[in-house]
């Protein structure tokens, strides 16, 4: 039976990839206005079902909460639609008369898209909209833990796209959640690009497929509260971010780091705002729960509330506790609090001075999270600039909730649910991925070399003796 499902999954992947290629050939002929109309239809239909999809996702996965998943669904539909409205992606994008250069947008083709269980519906809308905006078709591979809600999201998107004029097969989703089917899809000859959002193993598999891929590395961003910061506002930002969908956004803070002179102030204000600073015994109990013996994140703790996590670990916390905090001193594989934790749990680092803070932030990110996101709360622009020039991330966020700032909800970054980590993070892009990452640019270039002026033919030099001889001959003929 397992073998039959394995074969069926592979065959389904091949069939959907072939249909997507046929659909994409039609999409590639459509003008920008037609693609825009399709994208607008997707956004409208998806937003209308945002509550139903959020409820379905929470019930199926157990991750996060309905209200914040509704916000994610609306962000991936309404907010994204606003951001890409008017964006030119296909056809003539620009003309440069001075350099005699045209730029023409060309779709990449068929996209294979991996969907994570932490964002199983919003990711579908987001990736479908940026793909079709750029004239591409897309086939989704859902996470087994989120199969029903991801397929439902894909059905809504596909129906809206087709009713707006997209060919059948433009948006599709695997129905058999086997690893072999996902691998077959990524390796299918019709697939031109992979959009990989998921765990490290899945992203690595995407980059190993032999196809161009845009993957996302782990998020493990520290949040530095500088002495020039408004501490009350900084902790409010961190609490808002870390509790958003119960910490399932990869850009959310994973640690707070302060100088020693700030420790008491941050701790007192944190306790007022619902941060529970665990003692050594409590931190040990929760630490043993966060990761499995093989070092991977325990899926049972993902997206759970602070109170539920404490209960699972065997201790109680006050009513209204938002975030659990553990004192930490180092970063590494034996330090669970120094890792990415997709739940409302934070490490708390206290350093002697600003230089020590900078070194520890870099150490944490080099251990895990290079290229992803860093948050800083400060009013001193010089120290912000100093850290911005040193911290190895693609998103350096200032005075904003990292989960929301990183995806572009509270910052000027492009609104995205796929966040590239750049070369330092093992990614092919450092962008918040947009439709412009899903096209190729064809450049039409004219000759710019000035045509050299033709020089007059050189007159042959004649010797005086020859001139005298010719003159004599002419005189003799004249007679």
Image (cartoon, rainbow, N blue to C red):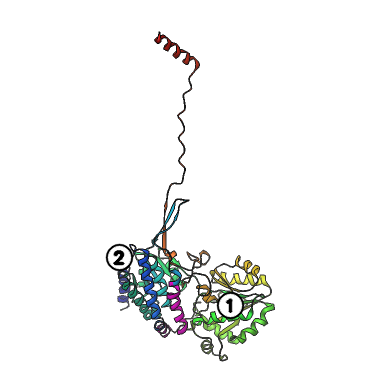
Residue 243 visible in the picture: yes
**Residue 184 lies in the magenta-colored region:** no
- Magenta stretch prevailing secondary structure: helix
Q: Quadrant of residue 393?
A: bottom right
Numbered circle sitting on residue 319: none
Please identify the quarter of the rendering in which residue 401 is found. Answer: bottom right
Query: Looking at the picture, how far across and down is residue 432, in whole percent?
Result: 48, 68
The picture places residue 247, in percent across and down from the top left corner, at: 51, 80
Label 2: few (<14), some (14–19) or many (≥20) C-alpha neighbours in 10 Å: some
Q: Are marks 2 and 1 in contact (CB under 8 Å)?
A: no
Q: Earlier in the sequence, mark 2 or mark 1?
A: 2
Q: Is residue 66 left or right of residue 148?
A: right
Question: Can residue 197 be seen here?
Answer: no
Q: Which mark is residue 22?
A: 2
Find the residue positioned furthest to the front. Answer: 478
Foreground disc of the pair 2, 1: 2
> The magenta stretch spans which residues?
54-81
Q: Residue at x 65, y 85 (%)?
A: 268
Nearer to us in this view, 30 or 290:
30
Q: Quadrant of the N terminus?
A: bottom left
Looking at the rendered image, the quarter that the C terminus falls into is top left
Tell me where residue 39 appears, x and y as whole percent: 38, 71
Left/right of residue 374 with respect to residue 264 in the rendered view: left
Along the viewing direction, whichever of 226 and 360 lies nearer the viewer: 226
Q: Which residue is mark 1?
A: 255
Residue lying at the far top in this picture: please name it.
Answer: 479
Q: Which element is circle 2 on?
A: helix
């Amino acid at each position: 039976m397992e073998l039959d499902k394995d074969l069926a999954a592979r065959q389904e992947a091949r069939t959907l990839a072939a249909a997507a290629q046929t659909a994409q050939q039609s999409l590639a002929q459509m003008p920008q206005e037609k693609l825009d109309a399709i994208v607008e239809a997707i956004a409208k239909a998806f937003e209308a079902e945002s509550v139903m999809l959020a409820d379905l996702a929470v019930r199926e996965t157990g991750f996060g909460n309905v209200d914040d998943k509704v916000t994610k669904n609306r962000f991936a539909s309404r907010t994204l639609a606003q951001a890409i409205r008017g964006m030119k992606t296909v056809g003539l994008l620009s003309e440069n008369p001075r350099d005699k250069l045209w730029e023409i947008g060309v779709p990449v083709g068929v996209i294979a898209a991996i969907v994570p269980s932490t964002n199983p519906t919003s990711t579908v809308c987001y990736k479908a909209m940026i793909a079709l905006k750029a004239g591409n078709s897309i086939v989704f591979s859902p996470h087994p833990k989120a199969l029903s809600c991801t397929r439902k999201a894909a059905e809504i998107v596909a129906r809206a796209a087709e009713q707006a004029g997209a060919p059948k097969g433009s948006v599709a989703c695997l129905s058999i959640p086997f690893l072999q089917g996902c691998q077959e899809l990524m390796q299918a000859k019709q697939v031109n690009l992979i959009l990989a959002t998921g765990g490290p193993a899945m992203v690595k598999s995407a980059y190993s497929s032999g196809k161009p891929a845009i993957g996302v590395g782990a998020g493990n961003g520290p949040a530095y509260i500088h002495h020039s910061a408004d501490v009350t506002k900084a902790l409010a930002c961190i609490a808002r971010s870390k509790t958003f969908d119960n910490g399932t956004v990869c850009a959310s803070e994973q640690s707070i780091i302060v100088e020693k002179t700030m420790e008491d102030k941050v701790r007192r204000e944190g306790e007022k705002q619902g941060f529970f600073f665990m003692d050594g015994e409590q931190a040990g109990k929760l630490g043993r729960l966060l990761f499995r013996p093989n070092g991977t994140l325990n899926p049972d703790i993902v997206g759970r509330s602070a109170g539920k996590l404490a209960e699972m670990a065997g201790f109680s916390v006050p009513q209204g506790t938002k975030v659990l905090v553990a004192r930490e001193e180092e970063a590494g594989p034996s330090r669970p609090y120094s890792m990415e934790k997709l739940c409302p749990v934070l490490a708390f680092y206290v350093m002697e001075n600003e230089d020590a803070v900078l070194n520890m932030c870099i150490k944490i990110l080099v251990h895990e999270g290079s290229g992803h996101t860093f948050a800083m709360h400060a009013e001193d622009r010089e120290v912000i600039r100093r850290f911005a020039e040193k911290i190895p991330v693609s998103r350096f966020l200032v005075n904003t909730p990292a989960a929301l700032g990183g995806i572009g909800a509270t910052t000027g970054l492009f609104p995205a649910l796929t966040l590239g980590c750049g070369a330092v993070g093992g990614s092919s892009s450092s962008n918040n991925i947009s439709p412009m990452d899903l096209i190729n640019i064809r450049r039409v270039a004219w000759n710019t070399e000035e045509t050299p002026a033709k020089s007059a033919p050189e007159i042959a030099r004649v010797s005086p003796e020859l001139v005298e001889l010719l003159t004599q001959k002419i005189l003799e003929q004249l007679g």
